[in-house]
Amino acid sequence: MERRQAGKQKGRKATRPFFSAVLPCCLAALPLLGTGCHRAHAMPQPVPLPQEPARTAAPRLRPAPVREPRPEQPKPEPPKAEATPVEPPKPEEPPKPPTLLQTTPANTEVDLERGIRATLKRAQTDLNRVDARRLNADARTQYDTAKSFIRQAEAAVREKNLVFAKTVADKAAGLAAQLAPK
């Protein structure tokens, strides 16, 4: 038994220098092996296309079309003027004024216009409470924009464009409410 253990120890001792030399190399190469998958791999070379086969037949030539001259046709004679009675021109009808496209029913139109005017009055009241001279540049721009919206809404109400007038009046009221002192 001693011989076996002595032989094992000799074998172990003999392999220790091998492991001690190889192990550090393997450990140093391990991170390099892990990064190999992260690199771009070389693309395979494209396969060249085969050459066209040689043509054995000559290309066909088409003959040019032959144009035959057309015979001249006799020109038709203009018809002779006959006496036709000339009708007097009809008087033109006066142009009709363009019809007004109504997007709201007539009974609610009055209510909508009343609501728009109330919104405009509220916006104008809020703007009258603001001292425009004491506003900074941005607030002054907001003030001028609200005044412009009020003018546009009033013009739209006169033209009976109530949908646009309501939109612009609401914008003017919102700006005026933000500018008005609390």
Image (cartoon, rainbow, N blue to C red):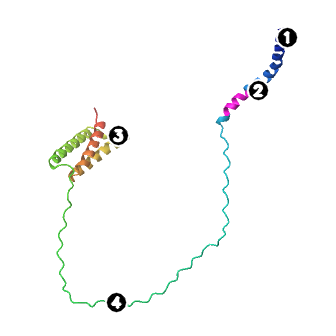
Kindly identify the amino acid type of the residue bearing the numbered disc 3.
Ala
Mark 4 vs 2, N-terminal side: 2
**Screen quadrant of the N terminus:** top right
Give the Cα separation between the discs numbered 1 and 2: 34 Å
Q: Which residue is mark 1?
A: 3
Q: Is residue 110 located in the magenta-colored stretch of the structure?
A: no
Q: Main secondary structure of the magenta part?
A: helix
Secondary structure under tag 1 reads helix
> For the residues marked 3 and 1, what is the alpha-carbon distance in whole angstroms?
104 Å
Residue annotated with mark 3: 139
Q: Nearer the viewer, residue 78 or 92?
A: 78
The crowd level at tag 2 (other Cα within 10 Å; few <14, some 14-19, many 20+) is few
Residue type at tag 1: Arg
- In the image, 88 versus 26, the foreground residue is 26
Q: Position of residue 174 (x, y in %)?
A: 29, 39
Disc 3 and disc 4 in contact, CB within 8 angstroms: no
Segment tinted magenta in the rendering: 28-35
**Label 4 belongs to which residue?**
76
Label number found at residue 25: 2
Residue at x 29%, y 43% (from the top left corner): 171
Looking at the picture, which amino acid does disc 4 mark? Pro
Real-space Cα separation, disc 1 to disc 4, in angstroms: 137 Å
Label 1 or label 4, whichever comes before in sequence order: 1
Label 4 neighbour load within 10 Å: few <14, some 14-19, many 20+:
few
Residue count near mark 1 (Cα–Cα under 10 Å), binned few <14, some 14–19, many ≥20: few
Mark before the other along the chain sequence, 1 or 2: 1
Residue 150, x across and y down, in percent: 26, 46
Q: Amino acid at mark 2?
A: Cys
